[in-house]
Image: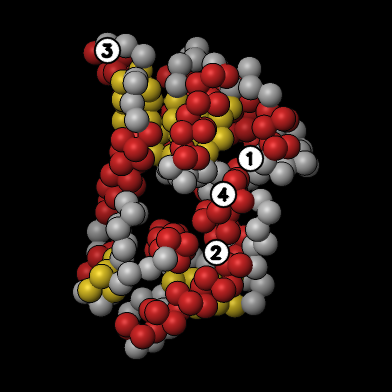
Amino acid sequence: MINLGLQLSAAGVTSLSGYALRFGEVMIVIVDERETVLNGYTAWFCREGVSAAGLAPQDFRQWVNTAPEPDIDAVEAFLLGDFRDREEVPVKIKSRSAAAVIAMNETKSLNDTLELFAAGVDDVVRKPVHVREILARIRAISRRTQQDAEPAQAPAGRIRVFSDGRDPEVGGEVLPLPRRERRILEYLMANKGRRVTKSQIFNFVYGLFDDGIDENVIESHISKLRKRLRQRLGRDPIDSQRFLGYRLTQD
């Protein structure tokens, strides 16, 4: 199985409490019993600029049962590869997270696909599958989830994000943004009405692969984002409180 301690050490994580891993820094969690699959998909997501981490099934089961809520909430999607009793995993994930759960099948089997959907997965893909397709499916699931939870979100505010690489629409027009600022706005929109900390935003934007960057860089990004939004909206939609974090407010 994957050498978890070595992987985390390489990512700059040196302190562990059992399996309470620093998944606040992870966007996608991959579960498979084969080290080659874990390493391969983690590297492929990294090349697409997406943070990911791989876990063997037994390690994942312990983590998902014990991880703090902020760590669980930081995960955008769970990708389930091949392992024994994986049909039992989606229910546990769904009891703690609203993130997308996607299963990868090695062979085309209608029975397996139906069993996985019955177990609670959001989608089933057949390998080989490109990580860009997986990301597109994750975004589609996320959009459906947000629409079900907040059907009035788009007309209620003057900010619209897409989470697929497109720039947001602000005041009915496209607002070109640098990638980091766009990701911050997407995160604030996903947590609209809730206050999020600077560390949470940093973890979402930078992930595992920029551990040498000081999280205070987020303050600079948000300052520039606020200026752009203020120019377009005529007001500052980002409420900030020292030591408490940031919250997106909309009229």
> Which quarter of the picture shows residue 60?
top right
Q: From this viewpoint, is residue 68 visible?
A: yes
Discs 1/3, front: 3
Cα distance in 3D space between marks 2 and 4: 16 Å
- 116 on left or right of 35: left
Q: Secondary structure at mark 2?
A: loop
Q: Residues within 10 Å of mark 2 (few under 14, many from 20)?
A: some
| Disc assigned to residue 207 | 4
**On screen, 124 above or below 204?**
above
Dot placed on the residue nearer the N-terminal end, 2 or 4: 2
> Which quadrant is home to the C terminus?
bottom left
Distance between mark 3 and mark 2 Cα atoms: 42 Å
Q: How is the image coloured?
A: secondary structure
**Which residue is at the front of the view, 247 or 91?**
247
Residue nearest the viewer, comparing 180 with 4: 180
Instruction: Pinpoint residue 148: horizontal percent, then vertical percent.
Output: 27, 51
Whichever of labels 2 and 1 marks the residue nearer the N terminus, that label is 1
Residue that label 1 marks:
67
As displayed, is residue 191 above or below residue 144? below
* Kind of residue sitting beneath label 1: Ala
Please provide percent x and percent y for residue 92.
49, 31
Q: Residues within 10 Å of mark 1 (few under 14, many from 20)?
A: some
Structural distance between the alpha carbons of marks 2 and 1: 18 Å
- Circles 1 and 4: CB distance less than 8 Å? no
Label 1 and label 4: CA atoms lie apart by 18 Å
| Residue 141 sits in quarter | top left
